[in-house]
Image (cartoon, rainbow, N blue to C red):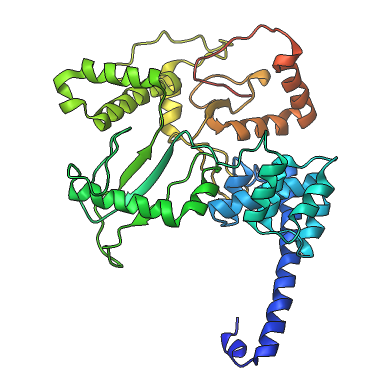
């Protein structure tokens, strides 16, 4: 871009040029949504080693989390109602308007909703929707079940206890606590719109905030996380009981220490069930070479989990490996239905999306769709054999 050329334009030409570029941007945005919708419908992100369209937009297209979320949501709405693409291209609707309308759009009300949102601001559309869908869409956004805010400040790391109310000016609060809480308050005040959008993102989003006292390039202390976690009365009762049972091993029933211990215990249990990891592995009876079973011995699960580094192993044609670590399943390299064995070399880790994708490539998409329909709860009772926390594919 030649910025010198722009500075030489007179006022009239500059404004005309800006209008022309905005019109082009709207047309390009509409085209972008159409392409995203088609890629999403064809699930082409799977072959690119991405477990979801959101991952593809963030990791391959380099969108921010919020930008990816808004564009995907708008693209899916536009696929259902193609007229939205024309409205975007001609400047009647912006992306935020489509995202707000998307949950309410139906064949019988699409014209009404689009007309009401045309050339309206976000606040105007939110107010109109609150009135139009009052029983189903309350005007006040409900408090999220939990949110984690990443706070990096030039002070000693401090963790604020769950349910602990400390005012930034309270006498009981240390200087470090006051600094963290002041930063949290600034996040709430200045980033409210961003947080509202980010709360809708899959898996949650951490917001990095620097202390106002920290200069550019200053060395930060280890990160601290401020967790807002509403809990019900039953959970609070369990928390108080655990604090009492821990006794003096946790000073003053420190909620943060309890939380950490609980997570460490849960992590060990999940790794034991999922990956067969244990501090004292038991000797296992070797199987016959011709054994035909989907059950995967713990020793083999441990070896596969360690070899694959607890990450999906699907790799795209350009050599990119899927980054997903959530919901991993043990997948047979040679499909079990075609003689695949549950051995270290015969198994690999795959995320759910790529496990299904591989099955469709081997057996055909229509065959797998029919199989999933037969396995759905609506198809009636069926006999199943489950391997706890160790899904197998193929």
Q: Position of residue 317 (x, y in %)?
A: 63, 48
Q: Residue at x 49, y 19 (%)?
A: 389
Residue 332 vs 130, above or below: the answer is above
Which residue appears at 31% of the width and 68% of the height? 216
**The C terminus, quarter of image:** top right
How far across and down, in percent of the image, does residue 249 sit? Answer: 16, 22
Please count the marks in the image.
Answer: 0
Query: Is 171 or 302 nearer to us in this picture?
Result: 171
Q: Nearer the viewer, residue 118 or 15?
A: 118
Q: Position of residue 253 (x, y in %)?
A: 21, 25
Figure quadrant of the N terminus? bottom right
The residue lying at 67 percent from left, 18 percent from top is 337
**Is residue 157 left or right of 187 when viewed as pictured?**
left
Horizontally, residue 317 falls left or right of residue 161, namely: right
x then y, percent, for residue 271: 39, 24
Tell whether 222 sits left or right of 351. Answer: left
- As drawn, is 107 to the left or to the right of 355? right
Q: Is residue 39 visible?
A: no
- The reply to whether residue 60 is in sight is yes
**Image quadrant assignment for residue 299:** top left
């Amino acid at each position: 871009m030649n910025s010198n050329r722009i500075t030489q334009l007179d006022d009239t030409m500059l404004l005309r040029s800006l209008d022309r570029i905005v019109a082009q941007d709207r047309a390009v945005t509409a085209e972008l949504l159409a392409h995203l919708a088609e890629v999403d419908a064809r699930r082409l992100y799977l072959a690119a080693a991405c477990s979801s369209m959101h991952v593809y937009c963030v990791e391959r297209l380099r969108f921010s989390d919020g930008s990816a979320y808004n564009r995907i949501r708008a693209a899916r709405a536009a696929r259902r109602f193609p007229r939205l693409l024309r409205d975007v291209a001609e400047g009647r609707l912006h992306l935020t308007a489509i995202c707000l309308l998307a949950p309410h759009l139906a064949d019988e009300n699409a014209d009404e909703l689009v007309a009401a949102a045309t050339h309206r601001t976000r606040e105007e559309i939110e107010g109109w929707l609150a009135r139009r869908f009052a029983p189903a869409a309350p005007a006040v956004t409900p408090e999220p079940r939990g949110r984690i805010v990443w706070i990096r400040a030039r002070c000693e790391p401090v963790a604020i206890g769950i349910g602990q109310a400390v005012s930034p000016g309270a006498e009981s609060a240390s200087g470090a606590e006051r600094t963290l809480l002041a930063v949290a308050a600034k996040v709430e005040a200045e980033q409210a719109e961003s947080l509202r959008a980010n709360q809708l993102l899959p898996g949650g989003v951490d917001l990095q905030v620097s202390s106002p006292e920290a200069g550019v390039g200053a060395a930060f202390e280890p990160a601290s996380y401020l967790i807002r976690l509403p809990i019900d009365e039953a959970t609070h009762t369990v928390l108080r009981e655990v604090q009492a049972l821990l006794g003096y091993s946790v000073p003053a029933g420190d909620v943060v220490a309890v939380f950490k211990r609980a997570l460490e215990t849960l992590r060990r249990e999940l790794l034991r069930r999922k990956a067969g990891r244990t501090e004292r592995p038991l000797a296992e009876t070797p199987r016959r070479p011709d054994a035909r079973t989907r059950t995967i011995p713990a020793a083999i699960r441990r070896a596969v989990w360690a070899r694959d580094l607890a990450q999906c192993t699907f790799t795209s044609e350009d050599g990119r490996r899927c980054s997903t670590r959530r919901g991993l399943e043990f997948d047979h390299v040679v499909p079990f239905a075609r003689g695949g064995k549950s051995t270290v070399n015969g198994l690999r880790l795959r995320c759910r999306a790529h496990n299904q994708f591989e099955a469709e490539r081997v057996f055909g998409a229509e065959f797998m769709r029919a199989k999933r329909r037969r396995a759905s709860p609506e198809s009636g009772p069926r006999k199943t054999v489950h391997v706890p926390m160790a899904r197998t594919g193929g």
